[in-house]
Amino acid sequence: MKKWEGGKKIFGWLNSNPTLFGSFIFIFAVSLAGFLAPAIAPYSPGGLEERGILEGPTWSHWMGTDELGRDLFTRVLYGARVSITVGVGTALIALVIGTAYGLLSGYTGGALDHLLMRVVDIFYGLPDLLIFILLSLLLGRNIAGVLIALGLVTWVRFARIARGQVLQAKELAYVEGARAMGAAHLRIIARHILPNILAPILVTLTFSIPAAILAESTLSFIGLGINDPYNEWGTSWGTLAQDGWRAMRTYPHILFFPGMAIFLTILAFNSFGNGLRDLLDPKGKGK
Amino acid sequence: MTRFLLQRLLHGVIVLWVVATLTFVLMRVTPGGPFDRERRLPPEVLANIAAKYHLDEPWLTQYARYLKGIIQGDLGPSYKYLNRSVTDVIADTLPTSVLLGILALALALLLSFPVGVSAAFYQNSWVDRCSMFLATLGISSPHFILAGLFIWFFSLYLGWFQAGRWDSMSSVVLPTLTLAAAPAAYLSYLIRSNLLETLGEEFIRTARAKGLRETSVVFKHALSNSLIPVLTVLGPLSAALVTGSFVVEYVFAIPGMGRFFITAVTDRDYPLIMGVTLVYTVILVCANLAVDLLYSLIDPRIKIP
């Protein structure tokens, strides 16, 4: 019963805000298409069957073909899987590390808090894009390596927000009450603090996903991101765009379609984040 | 004031040391090196190369040499560009990146203030909606897509500018537009939301109650009070712009520091990678320090201890 009401509430939100609804539908469709790519893609992603190379969009090849005759629509579908995985994976890694760190720091307070926050300050002063490139050299230019490297440079944002929220939530009367009644720390954190800090963290999570997708596709575009040509999971949209860049003058469609895929996906996540923020924080206090 | 400055400087030095150490360790533990070729070089040659670049010494000695070099402003020899030091390469390329960055920052500020303020002023009107829609588009467009669009439209279709050249005033236009778009969008968004927040405060009501004109309320009272968050992002933003964007320099073939960083990474030119990272960090630290100092100028309530 409770669950159903929750679902109804979410539906009500989506219905009241068309941008939120539209972007949600788009994100859902892109993710679904990406993960079902092996089943729904019209051709095989790496197959070099007998067909025309560098064809413009036709009925049989919606987005045309590339210089090796591979169907671009199929490659873009597989690329969706890569982008969504990198975006959501990075955001989740950053969320777990950052929130745990911020919780620990804010909840304990005192000298430990001070020390932990100095570390965060230093991380904030780091050039994150450069550190990410160096980290991904070490971890390997594959999806997992890029995902971990991106997660390791974005977690500080979550740490700061989580700590700030915990400091506020700690002072709430019923949290103090729970502590006075002798509730265990873990219980207080899980039952009273976490639900209170969820909203801003959720918003940060939504904005971290497009940021990660943008970073990954940009770096793949300049050849410093995912570079693993035999990967069955799919080729990054950034790499596809790079292929298209070289042929831009004569065959603009190879750049256009992967480019639009990246742009629209990032746009959808950003619009979703904006909508979510307005919804969860009607006064617009958060940034 | 002096204490604050010293504190910030110390913080900056620590950040620099962390970055120097981090890049040093990362470069040493990363598998593969600049001298790994498809055909293996004879061991004698490898030994000679190692001796030339002091790679045969223990790590700690190398680390000490590296730190000592940084203090003296010597970032070591480049592995890729023979007979050139990393300091030389950076000194050659940084001015180009700085020029492009300053132009882009100026353009972003010039665009975002009128857009952000008018969007807040006419909140929920079509002006607001259009500009915020444009801002969302700007934030969501990767550099290479914008660059592709600009090149296609302005160079190929209209034939106004030549892309991929860096020899005249007009070659600056498209890269600057591309680089400025996202910060302009982000700043207008930020200016609008902060201005709206400030406009909802008590002292604004007082100002209005005094019978001040609306323009005076917005420009004199609200705007200066809503600048602090904008200033906060200006630090990292200007550092990022001034050091040049990798992608913009890459797609427009601009001989700036970012493009050399990309080739340095693909060539595994470790000293150059470490050098660029350090220079970038120095600029970032300085920009943040400048922003901290500007706070007290804009808002007298913030006192520097």
Image (cartoon, rainbow, N blue to C red):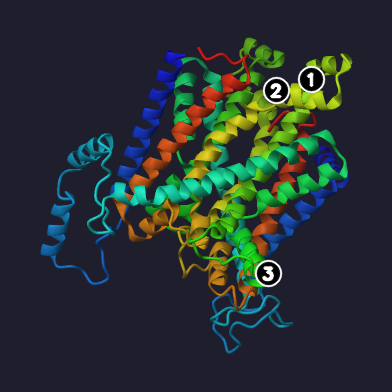
What mark, if any, has residue B158 been given in the picture? 3
Q: CA distance from mark 3 to mark 2?
A: 44 Å
Residues tagged 2 and 1 counted as in contact (Cβ below 8 A): yes
Q: Position of residue B84 (x, y in %)?
A: 26, 54
> Does residue A35 show up?
no
Q: CA distance from mark 3 to mark 1?
A: 49 Å
Q: Position of residue B270 (x, y in %)?
A: 30, 51
Q: Residues within 10 Å of mark 3 (few under 14, many from 20)?
A: few
Please report whichever mark, 2 or 1, sits nearer to the chain's N-terminal start: 1
The residue closer to the viewer here, B210 or A205, is B210
Local SS, label 2: helix
Q: What kind of residue is marked 3? A: Leu
Compared across the picture, whether A47 is left or right of B128 comes to left
Name the residue at 45% across, 16% down: B4
Name the residue at 58% across, 85% down: A53
The residue closer to the viewer here, A165 or B170, is B170
Would you place residue A28 above or below residue A181 in this image?
below
The residue closer to the viewer here, B305 or B274, is B305
Quadrant in the picture for residue B178: bottom right
Please report whichever mark, 3 or 2, sits nearer to the chain's N-terminal start: 3
Would you place residue B187 above or below residue B5 in this image?
below
Q: CA distance from mark 2 to mark 1?
A: 11 Å
Residues tagged 3 and 2 counted as in contact (Cβ below 8 A): no
The reply to whether label 3 and label 2 mark residues of one chain is yes
Please report whichever mark, 3 or 1, sits nearer to the chain's N-terminal start: 3
Chain at numbered mark 1: B
Chain at numbered mark 3: B
Residue on which the image places disc 1: B201
Residue on which the image places disc 2: B225
